């Protein structure tokens, strides 16, 4: 076994109380100097300018954040618009294909047995002008 050295206890409690008391006294002295300096006009103007600067900086940050949010929303809406535009184009093509005269004629013949009338089967009806009643 090795030798064990016994140390004398250090009076840390008393020295820390003195340090705390000195620290508090220094803080009070500095705060009196600061508050005393704020009574001067140039220091007050500087403090007001610093407050305006901080408020302006916060405004810039908020504005930039809102701008980014709005830009993201705009991008999403443009993507959605493009999707709807593609869908609309597809629907127009489908409508064009379904309403083609050849297809309509073919469906009419298949489903309803309809045929295109010949010249001899077409009758023109004269147009009669409406009679005005007085």
Image: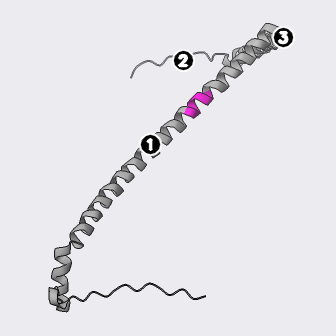
Choose the circle earlier in sequence order: 3 or 2.
2
Choose the circle earlier in sequence order: 3 or 1.
3
Choose the circle earlier in sequence order: 2 or 1.
2
Name the residue located 57 percent from the left edge and 88 percent from the top edge: 133
Which circle marks residue 36 in the picture? 3
**Direction from residue 121 to residue 19 in the image, left or right:** right
Mark 3 to mark 1 CA distance (whole Å): 50 Å
State which mark lies toward you, 3 or 2: 3
Identify the element where label 2 is drawn. loop
Q: Is residue 88 above or below residue 32?
A: below
Identify the element where label 1 is drawn. helix
User: Residue 125, position in %: x, y?
Assistant: 31, 88
Quickly name the residue at label 2: 6
In depth, the one of 100 and 76 nearer the eye is 100
User: Residue 82, position in %: x, y?
Assistant: 34, 51
User: Residue 51, position in %: x, y?
Assistant: 71, 21
Q: Colour mode? A: one colour
Which span is picked out in magenta? Answer: 58-63
> Quadrant of the image for the C terminus?
bottom right
């Amino acid at each position: 076994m090795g030798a064990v050295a016994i140390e004398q206890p250090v009076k840390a409690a008393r020295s820390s109380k003195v340090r705390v008391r000195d620290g508090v006294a220094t803080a009070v002295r500095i705060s009196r100097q600061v508050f005393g300096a704020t009574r001067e006009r140039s220091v007050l103007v500087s403090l007001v300018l610093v407050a305006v600067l901080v408020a302006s900086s916060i405004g810039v940050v908020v504005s930039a954040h809102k701008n980014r949010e709005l830009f993201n929303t705009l991008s999403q809406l443009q993507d959605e618009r493009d999707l709807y535009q593609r869908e609309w184009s597809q629907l127009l093509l489908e409508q064009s294909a379904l309403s083609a005269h050849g297809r309509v004629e073919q469906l009419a013949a298949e489903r309803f047995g309809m045929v295109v009338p010949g010249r001899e089967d077409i009758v023109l009806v004269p147009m009669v002008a409406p009679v005005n009643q007085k």
